[in-house]
Amino acid sequence: MIVTIMFMSGCNNKNFNGQIEKGNQTINVEDNIKDKGVTALFIKNSNDLIYKVIVTGETNYSEYGTDIVASAISALTINTVNSLVEFTDSELSYNQETRNGLPSIELEVSSFGSEVGKEKSLVLIESLRLGLKQIEQEYGNEFLKVMEISDR
C-alpha cells in the first residue's frame, strides 16, 4: 500500500488527545506548534526513541503551486510514511486531517517490530528529521520549525 498525501505538512491519530504525559506534568502539543509556518514536532518516548511525528501548518513561502518549501516538506514526509509501510515490520498509524484549519499529518509507531525493523524505522525517522532540519536551516524557521520533545 502506497500513501499519497498532498498537504503543506502534518497528521492526527484518532486516539491521540493532543497531550503527552511527562512525569508529573502534561504537555499540550498545541503549545509547541507555531502560529506561522510549519511545525515538525518529533516526540521521543522514555527510551529516547522518536515514536511520533506531527507536521502541521502552511509555509506561505510563495503562492500555492509554486511553494518549493511546502513541496519539499510534503515529499519528505510522504516518502517517510511510504518507506515505513513498505520496508519495515513496525506497526504504525498515520492520518491526515485539518488541525485548527491547517493541514496536518501525524505518524505514530506503536510497535517497532523486529530488531531489524526497529533499526530501519529509526533510520527512516531520523532521515526525515535531518531533511526537515536542513530545510529549516536553508529557508529559515519562519517557514519551518523542527522541534523535539520527550514524553519522559
Image (tube, helix red, strand yellow):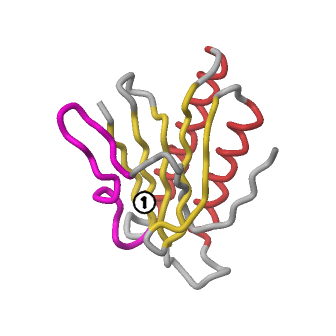
- Residue 26 on the magenta span: yes
**Viewport quadrant of the N terminus:** top right
Tell me the crowding category of disc 1: few under 14, some 14 to 19, or many 20 or more residues within 10 angstroms, Cα based. many
Residue 112 lies, with reference to residue 17, above or below; the image says above
Q: Residue at x 29, y 38 (%)?
A: 21
Q: Which residue is drawn at 48% across and 52% down?
A: 54
Q: Residue furthest bottom?
A: 63
Q: Which residue lies furthest to the left in this view?
A: 24
Helix, strand or loop under label 1: strand
Left or right of residue 75, residue 12 in this image? left
Name the amino acid type tagged 1: Thr
Q: In which quarter of the image is residue 44?
A: top left
Picture coordinates of residue 96 (x, y %)? 60, 59
Left or right of residue 2, residue 34 in this image? left
Q: Which of 141 and 91 is in front in this view?
A: 91
The stretch in magenta equals: 18-37
- Residue 80 on the magenta span: no
